[in-house]
Image (tube, grey):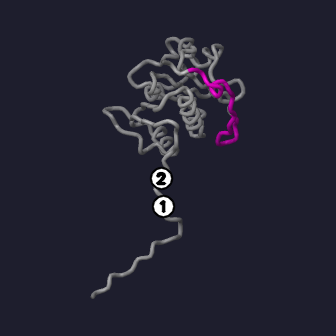
Amino acid sequence: MHPGPFPSTRTVAHAALRGGAVVALRPARACDSAAVAELHRRATPGSLRDRYPGSPPPALTDPESCLGSVPGTCTIVAFTGFRLVGVAQVVGHSPVADVGVLVREDHRRRGLGAMLVRHALHVAYELGYREAVSFGGPENKALRAMLHRLGLEGRTRYTGDLLVTRVPLPYEPELPASEPEVGVRPVVHRAARI
């Protein structure tokens, strides 16, 4: 049984990136296939390896099928104006979704990847998935930093040459252990001889 489409998989969300640019996040349409293919063509080989470890990017080989309306899948696109700056894909077989994100190099480190991941995890849950999994290269420092910001470090493991993150859905970030406030020192008592 494939999950059916939900209303939020058809809506548009707007968000501000660090630096002030506004992006529109929405499900991809067939008319977006050329922009998605161009995003992949402009990506560096390292970015493509990190996004698609072990398999060729489907948007390079067949962009229209990549954006097709296969039950239980969703491709989310992020635009600033008319320029595609990021894409997230939710695919899989129930109950586990594979979630992946690719962001234009000139829009990295501005919060877009984290926004796309959060949105994709929400959409995956609404599509009926109960767990999301994501794969990446362990040398990808930007990915590791994003996982930290999203509170997903505790759900990430090294498996061979892959960084594998498993997230139960609905997504709730794990908050890091509380650290003492700046300027506050713990009270230490000297040991007394008895």
Q: Position of residue 7 (x, y in %)?
A: 65, 26
Residue drawn at x 44%, y 29% is: 50
Give how far apart the Cα atoms at labels 1 and 2 are: 8 Å
Queried whether the magenta region covers residue 143, the answer comes back as no
Q: Write down the residue under mark 1.
A: 179
Label 1, residues with CA under 10 Å away: few <14, some 14-19, many ≥20: few
Residue type indicated by callout 1: Glu
- Residue 142 vs 135, above or below: the answer is below
Quadrant of the image occupied by residue 18: top right
Would you place residue 39 above or below residue 157 in this image? above
Look at the image and say whether residue 7 sits in the magenta stretch. Answer: yes
**Residue occupying the far right of the picture:** 81
Q: Are the residues flagged by discs 1 and 2 in contact, CB closer than 8 Å?
A: yes
**Residue most extreme to the front:** 1
Report x, y in % for residue 114.
56, 38
Q: Which residues are magenta?
A: 4-22
According to the picture, the residue beneath numbered tag 2 turns out to be 176
Q: Position of residue 40 (x, y in %)?
A: 54, 21
Helix, strand or loop at label 1? It is loop
Q: Residues within 10 Å of mark 2 (few under 14, many from 20)?
A: few
Which of the 4 image quadrants contains residue 82? top right
